[in-house]
Image (cartoon, rainbow, N blue to C red):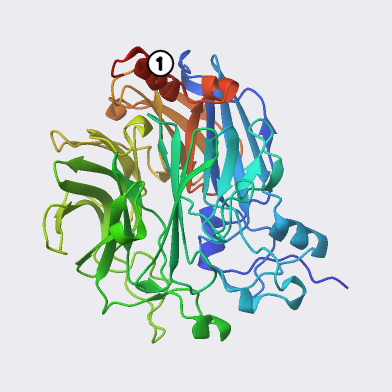
Amino acid sequence: MAEPIRFPDIPVYAGWGAPVRLESELRDLEVVQGKVPEDLNGTLYRCGPDPQYPPMRGDSIFIDGEGIASMFRFDHGHVDFRTRYIRNERFTLQEKARRSLFGRYRNRYTDDASVAGKNRGTANTNAIWHGGKLLILKEDSLPWEVDPDTLETIREWDYDGAVKAVSMTAHPKLDLDTGELLTFSYQAKGDATTDVAFYVVDKHGKIAHELWFNAPWAPMVHDFAVTETHVVIPFFPFETDLGVIKGGGPFYQWHPERQTVVAVFPRRGRPDEVRWFRGPTTSAGHMMNATMEGSKLHLDLCLYQGNCFPFFPTPEGKETEPVPPFLSRMTFDLASNSDGYETKQLSPMPCEMPRTDDRYQGRAYRHGYMICFGPDRAGGSMLGHLDHASGKLKLWNPEEASGIQEPCFAPRRPDAPEGDGYLLVLVNRIKEMRNDLAVLDAQKIEAGPVALIRLPTRVRMTFHGMWVPAQALETGIYPVTAMHEAAARAGVHA
């Protein structure tokens, strides 16, 4: 007789974290406040984990679970909604077995014997549209291509065999001036290897540049940043120990005795051009942006003075106490012979999931957006807008017993000034166990939503995603890229 499907009573599956395990489709969502702007046409894509079956070991962490993609299609005031699981090899194997087959987070040595050597990637972290493809990303495997209209899974994508790394980051950077996608892989030759691979993908989705180098240890690098000229990859003191994972232990361990080590190199760099900087023990999950100011490279990130993932223990097995993240700026002087860097705090309150107007990634920028919360994350979360020019932080509180997911920016038009557009934010209505989608004026978030769109269901938690204008889906190229190409042909600067 089959074992009953019963999820364990553990904190990660409690309350809002309870598995949904439901694929949805609904045309014409109800607009319960305001009006959807007529100039907001395109698709908001999101991705997050929603466990397919109870975990093999009876325990889990919140970043684990099978990937489910969400989309909100805006069409001249109408908004349609759809979710679909990513039917990759892991999902289909478990679907056939009707149970979990993959064990501890990223640890293949804890899997069921029947799936030895199979692809255990979860595809649960981010969605990005580039080169005419919608890709679903998780840093434990290569991207999965899905249909941008139906979200049906198409295939694993290795860029027609041009990518030799075994995985790719969930946080590639899209340069909308050139149409290039910049991406990387860590542990690029397999578990516990020190190999790092960096790729530049042209606007057509072809690999245009490749760089391999070695990290100081077998690292965990969730995010990185780029400028118009350089790439910056921080290596925080997380490490994979092959002996530990073979023994069934955690895939990552936190080493508080180590420094933060940062690699900086040109976007079309060679291995001998990688420059290393060192600083105090810190960590970060997410970068807001990076910019150049003369010879100085500024990296803006949500910085933790300690372990940002306290469920990854020390080698002694000790879990560390949570510490709050603050938006901070690391500054590296590329003209100096020093291998150190300076750090200063930018935000007056803790924040995470930082975003910008995507057209300004890697370039001088003024407006940053993020999730803000109290020091102990009590009282829910708020949307924050930090004006880097004035240092002023504006907030929008989505009401009591509510929280928000990562904001995404949608420009009012391709040539609109920086920050002139909308923020699209999923609101978690905790008491009602469902979501709203808020549309806010990105310059006036404190005024509240210009439109509030009701979902009758719950989107468990989407980590990341992006806005894709309708014109980009129709033509295969972002309108900002097309605008810059037209300006270049005319001999003017857009």
Quadrant position of residue 309: bottom left
Q: Quadrant of the C terminus?
A: top left
Q: In the visual, does 293 lie left or right of 45?
A: left
* Residue 101 or residue 439, whichever sits in front: 101
Q: Where's residue 216, x and y in %?
A: 34, 72
Number of numbered discs: 1
Q: On the picture, is 12 further left or further right than 385? A: right
Q: Residue at x 33, y 18 (%)?
A: 416
Q: Residue furthest right?
A: 1
Q: Where does the N terminus fall, quadrant-wise?
A: bottom right
Expressed as whole percent of the image width and height from the top left, the position of residue 262 reads 27, 62
Write the residue at 43% across / 25% down.
481
Whether 123 is drawn above or below 472: the answer is below
Q: Position of residue 379 (x, y in %)?
A: 34, 51
Give SS at disc 1.
Answer: helix
Q: Is residue 384 visible?
A: no
Of 254 and 456, nearer the camera is: 254
Q: Residue at x 54, y 54 (%)?
A: 138
Residue 488 seen: yes
Q: Is residue 103 above or below residue 404?
A: below
Q: Position of residue 100 (x, y in %)?
A: 71, 67
Instruction: Judge by depth and name the residue closer to the eye, 335 or 432.
Output: 335
Give left or right: position of 104 versus 319.
right
Up the image or down, 242 lies above or below 392; here it is below
Q: Is residue 124 above or below residue 5?
A: above
Q: Amino acid at mark 1?
A: Ala
- Residue pointed to by mark 1: 486
Mark 1 nearby-residue class (10 Å; few <14, some 14–19, many ≥20): some
